[in-house]
Image (cartoon, grey):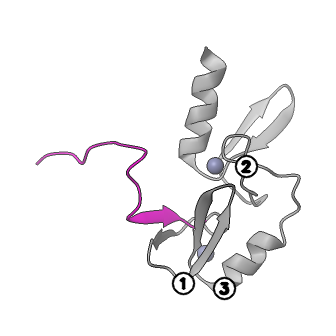
Amino acid sequence: MTKEQANPLNERSSSIDPVCGMTVGADSDYVVEECHKRIFFCSSHCKDKYFAIAPKDIDPICGMRVPSSSPYTLEEDGRVLRFCSVDCRAVYQERRRK
Ligand SMILES: [Zn+2]
Ligand SMILES: [Zn+2]
């Protein structure tokens, strides 16, 4: 039983739908390119919802729009930062530590 290599740059096989949090395969038809990053959605419904998001909720790491329902939040100086994924939140926390 070997664990898969934890390489954050090697996540092409699947992606997280930022709207509903579902894991979406990289072959999804519902894909948007933003900030040099491909964002995959499980359905056109989630894709539409993503574009309905007010651009104030921007992931400070990757520049993606983040829905207010995102569970990946971080409270800092009385305001709430939102992230598209647990990975971006971890990167942010890592940078703050330095
Ligand atoms: Zn979805
Ligand atoms: Zn992000």
Badge 2 vs badge 3, beta-carbon distance below 8 Å: no
Marker disc for residue 29:
1
**Upstream in the sequence, badge 1 or badge 3?**
1
Could you say which quadrant of the image residue 5 lies in?
A: top left
Whether label 3 lies within 8 Å of ligand 1 gets the answer: no
Q: Is 60 placed above or below 17 here?
A: above
Question: Residue 17 placed where, x, y %?
Answer: 58, 67
Instruction: Say whether disc 2 or disc 3 marks the residue closer to the N-terminus.
Output: 3
Please identify the dominant SS of the magenta region: loop
- Magenta highlight range: 1-17
Q: CA distance from mark 1 to mark 3?
A: 9 Å
Disc 1 residue type? Asp
The residue where tag 3 is placed is: 44
* Disc 1 versus disc 3: nearer the observer: 1
* Quadrant housing the C terminus: top right
Please rate how many residues cluster around mark 2, counting C-alpha atoms within 10 Å: few if below 14, some from 14 to 19, many from 20.
Answer: some
Measured in 3D between alpha carbons, the distance from the residue under mark 1 to the one under mark 2, in whole angstroms, is 22 Å
Disc 2 C-beta below 8 A from ligand 2: yes
Q: Residue furthest front?
A: 36
* Kind of residue indicated by mark 2: Gly
Which residue is disc 2 drawn over? 63
Comes first in the chain, label 1 or label 2: 1
Other residues around mark 1 within 10 Å, as few (<14) / some (14–19) / many (≥20):
few
Q: Where's residue 11, x and y in %?
A: 41, 55
Which one is closest to the eye, mark 2 or mark 3? 2
**3D distance between C-alphas at marks 2 and 3:** 21 Å
Residue drawn 65% across and 53% down? 84
Mark 3 nearby-residue class (10 Å; few <14, some 14–19, many ≥20): few
- In the structure shown, which secondary structural element does the residue marked by tag 2 occupy? loop
Confirm whether the magenta stretch covers residue 2. yes
Q: In the visual, does 45 lie left or right of 26?
A: right
